Image (cartoon, rainbow, N blue to C red):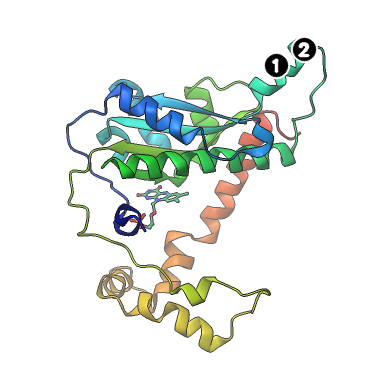
Amino acid sequence: MHDFLINRHTIRSYSDKSVDDHLLNSLLETACRASNTGNMQAYSVVVTKDSERKKELAPFHFNQKQVTNAPVVLTFCADLNRLTKWCQNRNTTPGFANLQSLTYASIDAVILAQAFCTAAESQGLGICYLGTTTYNAEQISQLFQLPKLVIPITTVTVGYPAEALDLDKSDRLPLSAVIHQEMYTDYTSSAIDEAYRMKESMPQNQQFVEINGKENLAQVYAEIRYAQKETDYFSETWIEAIKKQGYID
Ligand SMILES: Cc1cc2nc3c(=O)[nH]c(=O)nc-3n(C[C@H](O)[C@H](O)[C@H](O)COP(=O)(O)O)c2cc1C
């Protein structure tokens, strides 16, 4: 097993070293070898290197510092525009303006993004995903002048790490907590205790609970980090963006 996969972690601070265009293109080309639905490659990637454009983009990612700090920002989009135009130009009528097409195009975009991340990390680069992409998809679409049937799905910031790689490795649930043999075994209360025991006992997580004035880590997740009021609100903004980009009415 490759050590870089086991030891990897998200990098949010980057050094001043730029990412060579040749390397970037070769990583993207490698990533495009990933599996994709029907080999339609229903995705596009917007590359942002210009610092002024990064400044314009940053507020849509709630000014997370990675956007302006990283030399390269990649916005991975579900794209059925290109395929639609190809079909139209070849005298046929495509039917990609629907949720099913958006779903597989999104899956393709995420697989592409992860293939890129793995390739980049194998070369000593650091990456950070930005989940904020789907929160403000409409504004990001406007900034990049995305036409109908193109919508941003996820964003990855890329650069050489300013931080040492092994200082900050994040925890994971035990494998037994996430794997089900043959059939799904629903979680008993004690299985939940077992699954989250290590996470809850970590000093940094206990500190996190204290700082947020909550009783436990689950409350921090449910009431602060992913509070329902906000997730409901950003579900609405996401639905609006999907409509605007022409996938649903
Ligand atoms: C879809 C997705 C969205 C994410 N969004 C953000 C984000 O907006 N900001 C951030 O700092 N990290 C983000 N992350 C990184 C996660 O926080 C990180 O992967 C997780 O905490 C595990 O840490 P590790 O990657 O260092 O192992 C995101 C990761 C994924 C896969």
The spot of residue 4 in percent (x, y) is: 30, 52
Front residue of 73/114: it is 114
Q: Name the residue under label 2.
A: 90
Image x and y of residue 22, in percent: 32, 22
Could you tell me if residue 148 is visible in this image?
no
Quadrant including the N terminus: bottom left
Local packing at callout 2 (Cα closer than 10 Å; few below 14, some 14-19, many 20+) is: few
Q: Position of residue 76 (x, y in %)?
A: 49, 34
The answer to whether residue 208 is above or below residue 73 is: below
Q: Is residue 155 left or right of residue 88?
A: left
The residue at the point 61 percent across, 38 percent down is 36
User: Which residue is denoted by mark 1 in the rendering?
Assistant: 86
Mark 1 to mark 2: distance in Å? Answer: 6 Å
Q: Would you say 189 lies left or right of 196 here?
A: right
Q: Residues within 10 Å of mark 1 (few under 14, many from 20)?
A: some
- Note whether residue 152 is visible: yes
**Closest to the observer: 35 or 167?**
35
Indicate the position of residue 54 as horizontal and vertical percent values: 34, 27
Quadrant placement of the C terminus: top right
The amino acid marked with disc number 1 is: Trp
State the residue at coordinates (41%, 68%). Answer: 220
Give residue 201's quadrant in the image.
bottom left
The secondary structure type at the circle numbered 2 is loop
Contact? badges 1 and 2 (CB < 8 Å):
yes
Residue 77 is drawn in which quadrant? top right
Residue at screen point 31% across, 22% down: 21
